[in-house]
């Protein structure tokens, strides 16, 4: 059975017409989780200094990936979750806006990072994460996703960056 087969599809969640890809069914089996992280690590065939994970499921795959690569892990969080000096960026959602934050001392000017999340859909959150990283003078060496919804074409918004994923829908 492939990793793709391990992800549960939930129709009409969170709203009618949407098929939610529930990664918890893949994560609950140790060997499947290990295989996913190993495959993600294989995609990083370029130099990086840090792994950046986007809240919340980006933490689930980003932290073990950083561990496997012996790199530091930097979280990007929703507003009000980080205790020290931070920067934030607001971005558009389908209906409204949202924002994300990162500690200003998480990365240094000139460092190379990979931004990691569980799912690439529209690419909006990833674009916001790129803005945070680049505003601190670091370089986005790549973006890496566990899953990608190919028909939504979020990759197009990220066309100036290297984008990899291991499961495609």
Image (cartoon, grey):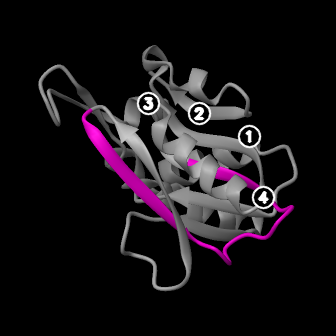
State the image coordinates of residue 151 (x, y, percent, origin top left).
44, 14
For label 4, the residue is 138
Could you tell which of marks 4 and 2 lies nearer the N-terminus? 4
Report the quarter where the C terminus lies.
top left
Q: Nearer the viewer, mark 4 or mark 2?
A: 4
Magenta-colored span: 95-116
- Measured in 3D between alpha carbons, the distance from the residue under mark 4 to the one under mark 3, in whole angstroms, is 24 Å
State the image coordinates of residue 160 (x, y, percent, origin top left).
73, 29
- Measured in 3D between alpha carbons, the distance from the residue under mark 4 to the one under mark 2, in whole angstroms, is 25 Å
Q: Are marks 4 and 3 in contact (CB under 8 Å)?
A: no
Q: Are marks 2 and 1 in contact (CB under 8 Å)?
A: yes
Could you tell which of marks 4 and 3 lies nearer the N-terminus? 3
- Measured in 3D between alpha carbons, the distance from the residue under mark 2 to the one under mark 3, in whole angstroms, is 14 Å
Q: Which residue occupies the extreme top position in the image?
A: 151
Crowd band around label 4 with a 10 angstrom C-alpha radius: few (<14), some (14–19), many (20+): some
Q: Is residue 1 magenta?
A: no
Crowd band around label 3 with a 10 angstrom C-alpha radius: few (<14), some (14–19), many (20+): some
For label 1, the residue is 43
Q: Are marks 2 and 3 in contact (CB under 8 Å)?
A: no
Q: Is residue 111 magenta?
A: yes
For label 2, the residue is 166
Q: Which mark is residue 121?
A: 3
Crowd band around label 2 with a 10 angstrom C-alpha radius: few (<14), some (14–19), many (20+): some
Q: Is residue 134 visible?
A: yes
Q: Nearer the viewer, mark 2 or mark 3?
A: 3
């Amino acid at each position: 059975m492939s990793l793709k087969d391990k992800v549960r599809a939930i129709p009409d969640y969170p709203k009618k017409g949407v098929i939610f890809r529930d990664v918890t069914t893949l994560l609950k089996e140790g060997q499947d989780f290990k295989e996913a992280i190993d495959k993600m690590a294989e995609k990083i065939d370029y130099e990086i200094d840090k792994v950046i994970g986007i809240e919340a499921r980006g933490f689930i795959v980003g932290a073990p990936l950083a561990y496997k690569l012996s790199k530091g892990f930097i979280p990007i969080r929703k507003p009000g979750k980080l205790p020290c000096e931070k920067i934030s960026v607001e971005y558009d959602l389908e209906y409204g806006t949202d924002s994300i934050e990162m500690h200003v001392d998480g990365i240094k000017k000139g460092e190379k990072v990979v931004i990691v999340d569980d799912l690439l859909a529209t690419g909006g959150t990833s674009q916001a994460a790129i803005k945070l990283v680049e505003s601190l003078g670091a370089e986005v060496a790549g973006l890496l996703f566990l899953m990608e919804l190919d028909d939504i074409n979020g990759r197009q918004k990220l066309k100036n960056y290297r984008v990899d994923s291991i499961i495609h829908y």
